[in-house]
Image: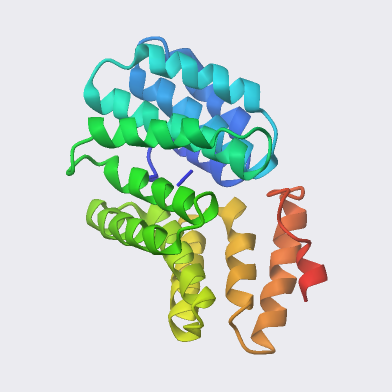
Amino acid sequence: MPESVVGTPDVWRLRARGCWAEAAAILAPYCADSPDTALRRAALLVEGCMFTLDGWSEAEDALRSAEALAGSDEERGAAACERGHLAYAATLFSVRDRADEARAAFGRSAALLSQVSPGRPLLDFRRGLFAENVAQNPTAARAAYRRAHAGAVAHGDALLTSFTWRHLAGLAAADGDLAEAHRGFTESLRIRVDIGYLVGTAPAMLALAEVEPEPAATALRAEAARLHALLGGIPVWLPHPAESA
């Protein structure tokens, strides 16, 4: 789940290493009195689903609790964005087709979040994901990613910026613009290394390796394999880095 690197250092360190349940447990005692904390806990568990393809019911329960606590338009809009993301993930990984639910939730979030809301760039990014991977509309995806990128940079959201760089680069690669793809993948990887987002570093290395000349490409794949093994094979959907060398 791409967002600002906020919260306690312990929560971030656990999240960055793929320990979403442990990070969520730190927040759990404070959720009843804080809609924001409840949503952050739900977001951690949803992100865990994205990387492990497990924990769907726990994420659903946490999200329902966060939705029940939301009181303002900003809180309801952020919760709707997370609802859309969970439904998108379930659809993307063929757990269950929830595309209509995702589309409706993102639409509700867009209606609730103002154009200057700090949550708007994340919503734009997730709508881009839906457009690219579910609706198969790269033109709409590119426009959404560009809005998200501009917003992430403006709000100083380093992690989201790394995601927008990566997905814009992926579209550039698909269009044959390898120079722009290389630029985007390089920036995405650099940011993830800088902020210590270990669980997202191996995928970023493999993406860059696809547009990097040898011998640098092989070195990136070897380092991705080492890191992937160190993290216990998370993300589980990543092709085995050693096999892509």
Q: Is residue 104 above or below residue 31?
A: below
Left or right of 104: which side holds 94?
right
Residue farthest right in this picture: 243
Query: Which of the two residues, 160 or 106, is positioned nearer the viewer here?
Result: 106
Query: Which of the two residues, 202 or 182, is positioned nearer the viewer here?
Result: 182
Residue 64, image x, y percentages? 48, 16
Q: Is residue 81 visible?
A: yes
Query: Which of the two residues, 93 or 227, is positioned nearer the viewer here?
Result: 93
Q: Is residue 208 above or below residue 157?
A: below
Q: How is the image coloured?
A: rainbow
Q: Residue, x 27% and y 15% (percent of image)?
A: 71
Left or right of 7: which side holds 196?
right
Q: Residue, x 72% and y 81% (percent of image)?
A: 218
Q: Is residue 184 above or below residue 48?
A: below
Residue 233, image x, y percentages? 76, 50
Residue 134, image x, y percentages? 53, 49
Residue 177, image x, y percentages? 47, 83
Give the total of numbered labels. 0
Q: Is residue 7 visible?
A: no
Snapshot quadrant of residue 47: top right
Q: Is residue 155 above or below residue 204?
A: above
Query: Which quarter of the figure is the C terminus placed in?
Result: bottom right
Q: Residue, x 77% and y 72% (percent of image)?
A: 244
Q: Residue, x 67% and y 28% (percent of image)?
A: 55
Snapshot quadrant of residue 140: bottom left
